[in-house]
Image (tube, rainbow, N blue to C red):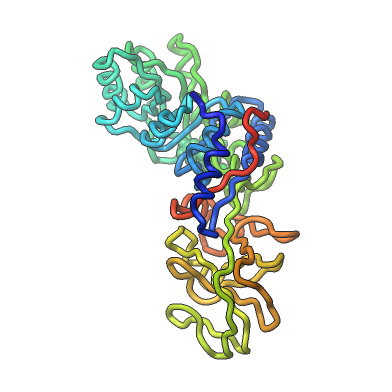
Amino acid sequence: MPNPEPAALSRVHAEASDRPTRIRVDLDALAHNLHALRAHAGVPVMGIVKANAYGHGLVPVARHLQAQGVDQLGVAFVEEGVALREAGVTVPILVLGGIHAPQVTRFIEHDLEITVSSPAKLRQVEAAAEALGRKAVIHLKIDTGMERIGVHSENAGPFIEAAVGSRWCTVKGVYSHLACADDPASPMTALQLERFLDACAHFPRIGAPMPLRHLANSGGVLHFPETHLDMVRPGIALYGVMPDPASHATVDLRPALSLVSQVVYFKVVRAGRPVSYGATWAPGVDTRVVTVPIGYGDGYPRALSSRGEVLIRGERHPIVGRVCMDQFMVDLGPGGTAYNEDEVVLIGRQGDAAIACEAVAQAAGTIPYEILTGLNDRIPREYLGGTPGAA
Ligand SMILES: *Cc1c(COP(=O)(O)O)cnc(C)c1O
């Protein structure tokens, strides 16, 4: 049974920690993004919640998406699916990753849909389903250009025929994954779509009903309407973040995650005195420096050493010197002021200023996905909005 008060519960957990550093998840932004993406695509949505819901918190996010009427959820690993079932999430869940034979029983026992990516894996699923006396619900994975998992589209015919003819498997879906959809100009997506539709054509050829065809990740949803087919699988866009600097906002999305902390120390650093490990940075004049209690041990990248920025009192200030495991320093300048306990925004808004996850990723030399999924469980998460039952 779904818990009616997920947000309230999670707030209690966050309050139980008096660590000033926290992730704030705006559940209303998440709901807005789900509805905006579904309206844009015009087909059902499989909300992707793998990797702790891209750092937003697996269970609270999944419960909220379920309350908002998401059609299906997608995770990477069986453990993530089991955690959702144990938390009372009842919507269909597809596990996207490749399967290992010893795990198959657990999929079926927890009513998780299985990605079948080869004829050998099909036989493993059939064997486990037969042993349990319970049919497995499967999605066939076709490789159209990612070269990750799946049967190459040119070999899909016999694979599809074997799956359709299986006594112990129900073929609910057929899918593939786009390698370059975050770039609206890439010709790869059209090629992958063509290969995918060729593979899907085997179903009518053998007189089988067409299962759910799904192909579009966030990039596909945003930039390639012809990939929407029967269902879309947005991950990062659901959280209001763009997959790539080349992406553009074809849908009005709102970032759901903020990362905040508080000043824990204030001092004047004399001209020429270096700051932090390795003594890599020193001020040219006496300056005011504050310390912020979060570091790479929380998943805030060390690559932001002397490159990142934060907001304090509505102003942008640079991180100076190396980011440590648990702390880093920020230069307010010779005339800057801040007090202990002042709010520090690392990702999100403060007054009229904002730091987007995309900008943090660019400064760190990585992609927004890695920033979000890197934020680990040492940081308490707090859930705002999301009045139970509100649509
Ligand atoms: C992660 C993943 C998605 C979601 O990707 P985004 O780029 O975050 O939208 C969709 N489908 C599969 C198979 C995935 O592994």
Residue at image x 55%, y 74%?
Answer: 265
Residue at position x 51%, y 77% in the image: 321
Q: Nearer the viewer, residue 135 or 69?
A: 69
Give 191 or 238, whichever is nearer the viewer: 238
Which x, y percent locates residue 331?
61, 77
- 187 relative to 327 in the view: left or right: right
Question: Would residue 289 be visible to someone looking at this image?
Answer: yes
Q: How many marks?
A: 0
Q: Single out the residue that lies furthest toward the top.
A: 207
- Residue 44 in the image: state x and y as whole percent: 59, 25
Residue found 50% across the figure and 81% down from its top: 275
x and y, in percent, of residue 208 in the image: 45, 11
Q: Residue 195 location in percent, x, y?
A: 49, 30
Q: From what the image shows, is residue 349 above or below residue 237?
A: below
Question: Residue 20: which quarter of the image?
Answer: bottom right
* Nearer to the camera, 266 or 274: 266
Residue 188 in view in this figure: no
- Judged from this view, the residue extending furthest toward the right is 352
Vertically, is 239 above or below 345? above
